[in-house]
Image: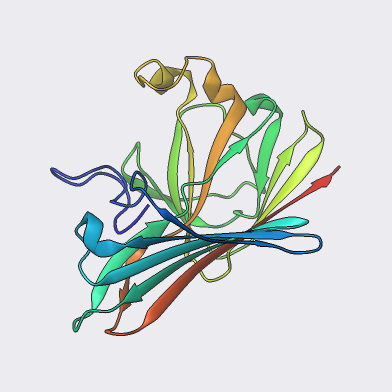
Amino acid sequence: CFPWFGSKTDQPSHGLVRQAEWELEQIELLKESAIVRFCLDGNVIGLDQMMLRVSYHMSDSLDINFYVENLADKPFEFQFAFHSYFLIGQLSELHIEGLSQARYYNQLSKQTETDTNPFIFIAEETDRIYQNKQNLKLVDRYYEREISILADELADTVIWNPNRSKSLRLLDLLSTEFQHFVCIEPAQINHLHCIEPNEKWIGSMRIAVKNI
């Protein structure tokens, strides 16, 4: 999601780059890994004098880097989120670690709350923006695996699952598919990030999987 998160009047939901056509810039094949790089000229989508790049480094982990370069003569403010969805075996067999005592904004109740539970279980529609810089673990007991999500420099984390109630209202989701994914997004939402002229910004995330 870039340069805004969520809805915006008369604009695409979650920004301009999600559905843009990116250009393949480079494929680099290494001995035990591979790197794929894409680029997007911001002028094409109305982000004048912005150059965007994203790289995927695939090895025993997946490293994703999102690059923003401000080529303009004025500062540029934005929000950002990775919009990452994780396939899981069964929602009832999942919990998330690393958010205990973190404050979050509940987008359903429009209230700011604190999560006091050591583990997060998702049993109903969930839409939260956590103020969190901790590394997270997604524990999937159905597939007997643990997924680590590392994104130290991003200040927030979004957790979303529509559950059955909202799934029935979503045209691109079957009513039972909510049971097999969770959205966990390292993000920069609560405070706009500002890039000065001729400066760059990088948002990074590492995903690693191990058996349990």
Q: Is residue 189 visible?
A: no
The residue most toward the right is: 212
In the rendered image, the vertical position of residue 77 relative to residue 206, given as above or below: below
The quarter of the picture where residue 172 lies is top left
Image quadrant where one finds the C terminus: top right
Q: Please tell me which residue is depicted at 24% across the width and 57% down the height of the picture.
A: 44
The reply, left or right, for residue 108 in relation to residue 212 is left
Query: Is 75 displayed left or right of 34 in the figure?
Result: left
How are the colours assigned in the image?
rainbow
Q: Is residue 196 above or below residue 205?
A: below
Rendered residue at 61%/54% (across/down): 100
| Number of numbered discs visible in the structure rendering | 0
Residue 137 in picture, x, y percent from top left: 69, 50
Task: Check the image and name the residue furthest to the left.
Answer: 10
Is residue 149 or residue 34 the one in the foreground? Answer: 34
Q: Is residue 100 left or right of residue 159?
A: right
Q: Is residue 201 left or right of residue 208?
A: left
Q: Quadrant of residue 133?
A: bottom right
